[in-house]
Amino acid sequence: MYEWISKLTGNSPAVRRLAAVCGWLPRPVTLALLHFAALLLYMLAGSRIIGRIAANMKDLLPQRREAGIRRYTRQYLANVVISLYEILIDSQRLSETGAGRFIVRGEQYLRDVLREGRGAIVFTPHTGNFFYYYWYLTKSYNCLTVATGGSPELRPLYEKFQAMGCPGLDYDSVPPLELLRRLKKHLEAGGIVFLLGDFWRPAFPLSEMFGRTTRSPEGAALLSIEQKAAVIPFYGRRVHGFTHELVFESPLPLYERFTRKQRGEATRLLNRFMEKVIRLHPEQWFYWFNAEERWERETAGWNDDASPAQTG
């Protein structure tokens, strides 16, 4: 998947030519072409890639039938293709058309938490077009995220959104303790920290998701507990075409239930939220193409006292 993304993000002249062509096309025609491109990708990507996506879906969604897995796989590729188009080309129209792109539910939860003056942590998995959802938050709130700019394939996407006024801290270049300090300062100022909780690195503390041992960033839990800032579970999904649904759920005041030493337990609670979202909308989750890489081969004891610098 990263290889495909790299071919697009690394070929700026081709992207500019495509943008010029798409600017003349009616949006329904553009959408039809994108779905056709996704179908071609499904047919030509090869059994190794498509088979891995389908195998990961079968592994985590064992109750779904074979026909459903095939449908989810096709829908997943369509969402990836359309999202790349949105980010690379159509994002320049967001300021003009953004109001009509989003169906928002539960945003009052976020507003109510912000009135308490301790900031808020919006916690989400990588579903739908997560770049667009961050853009939505930055247009209405003082919002900061943590990105993984070290990836050469994804860096052009992050840089594009930085140019659109969407600030972010680079996990791969900002020292961990400095990263944590700046996130705390942002919350203390009453801002929003937007964290993608299914970000994975082999050095993260042990955790659990889908009944499997994995490694998860504990930054959301740690920030909530130490700063007494509520976590707002959130997810976005593509409902049709270029329209997205944004769902804010009831806040989780983790600081009322967990201590700093229990942040691993709090993280597992947050992981169960992401698991719920992925089960509800499996075609929307970005990481099906390499999900198998995040499961530990051998189960080890929980490491709830891992370094707080591993915020993710």
Image (tube, rainbow, N blue to C red):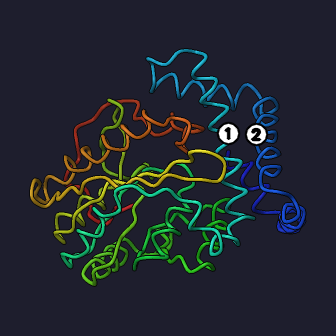
Q: Position of residue 271 (x, y in %)?
A: 32, 44
Q: Residue at x 88, y 67 (%)?
A: 20
Can you say whether 171 is above or below 37 in the image?
below
Q: Amino acid at mark 1?
A: Leu
Q: Along the horizontal axis of the image, is 238 left or right of 117?
A: right
Q: Quadrant of the N terminus?
A: top right
Task: Identify which residue is drawn at 22% across, 42% down.
Answer: 302
Inter-mark Cα distance, 1 to 2: 6 Å
Residue type, label 2: Ala
Image position of 35 with respect to 195: above or below: above
Q: Which sits earlier in the primary sequence, circle 1 or circle 2?
A: 2
The answer to whether residue 200 is seen in the rendering is no
Specify whether 225 is left or right of 197: left
Q: In the rendering, which numbered label is found on residue 213? A: none
Name the spot of residue 300 as percent of width and height, x first.
27, 35
Quadrant assignment, res 263: bottom left
198 over 15 or under it: above or below: above
Give residue 76's position: percent from left, percent from top.
Answer: 62, 38
Q: Picture quarter containing residue 310?
A: bottom left
Quadrant in which the C terminus appears: bottom left
Q: Residue at x 56, y 80 (%)?
A: 165
Q: Are marks 1 and 2 in contact (CB under 8 Å)?
A: yes
Badge 1 is on which residue?
77
Q: Helix, strand, or loop for circle 1? A: helix
> Depth check: 258 or 171 in front?
258
Q: Which residue is mark 2?
A: 38
Q: Nearer the viewer, residue 73 or 239?
A: 239
Q: Is residue 38 depicted above or below 204 in this figure?
A: above
